[in-house]
Amino acid sequence: MFYILALFFFTPIYNPMAKITYITHDNKNYEINVEKGLTVMEGAVQNDIPGIDADCGGGMACATCHVYVKEDWLDKLPKKEDGEDDMLDMAFEPKQNSRLSCQLIVSDDLDGLVVNIPFKQG
Ligand code: FES
């Protein structure tokens, strides 16, 4: 009995979700619990966040999932691939902190991530 109780109390509780905050161009905040393994773009689309259309469905071919990542998160994200940089060059007003949200896979590491949606996508 002791072992069963110990297992119950000392087993970490797995949380399958991570909180992602999407901020629209008109400063509306959407704090969404997104299932780990989905992309930041998929979290937005599934929750009808305005401004992330994802026209290519995550194929890195449209840049309609462009977001600005809060600066303090930049070092925590996976590095951009060449294709992402090329697509961001065609996005509206790309900045140093621009990312394609379809390339950001939600994980424990991204719990608390904050992204801003560009004005043009609003
Ligand atoms: S959904 Fe098209 S580039 Fe991300």
Image (spheres, rainbow, N blue to C red):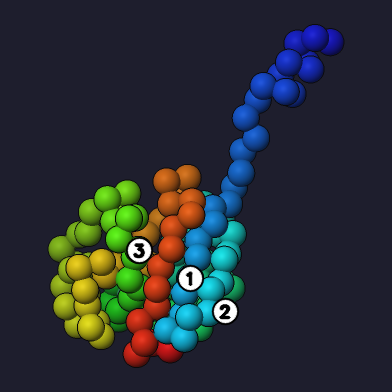
The one of 21 and 81 positioned closer to us in this rendering: 21
Decide if residue 88 is on the left or right side of residue 119: left
Which residue is rendered at x = 33% and y = 76% of the image? Answer: 66
Q: Could you tell me which secondary element the residue under label 3 belongs to?
A: loop
Whole-number angstrom distance, CA of label 2 to CA of label 3: 21 Å
**Residue 76 has which mark?**
none
The reply to whether residue 106 is visible in this rendering is no
Question: From the viewer's perspective, is the residue at label 2 or at label 3 nearer?
Answer: 3
Quarter holding residue 71:
bottom left
Inspect the image, locate mark 3, and give the three-letter code of the amino acid beneath it: Lys
Disc with the residue nearer the chain's start (1 vs 2) = 1
Residue drawn 33% across and 71% down? 68
Helix or strand or loop: what does disc 2 sit on? loop
Per the model, the C-alpha gap separating discs 3 and 1 is 11 Å
Q: Which mark is residue 48?
A: 2
Q: Is residue 1 above or below residue 109?
A: above
Q: In the image, is residue 118 above or below residue 46?
A: below
Residue at image coords 75%, 11%: 3
Q: Is mark 3 within 8 Å of ligand 1?
A: no
Identity, as a three-letter code, of the amino acid under mark 1: Tyr
Considering only order in the chain, which callout, 3 or 2, is on the residue closer to the N terminus?
2
The earlier-in-sequence mark between 3 and 1 is 1
Point out the image quarter for the N terminus: top right
Mark 1 lies on residue: 22
- The location of residue 26, given as percent across then percent down, is 47, 86
Q: Is residue 95 visible?
A: yes
Is label 1 in contact with label 2 (beta carbons under 8 Å)? no
In the visual, does 17 lie left or right of 2? Answer: left
Element under label 1?
strand
Labelled disc at residue 70? 3
Q: Which residue lies at the image location 34% right of the left edge and 65% below the top edge?
A: 69
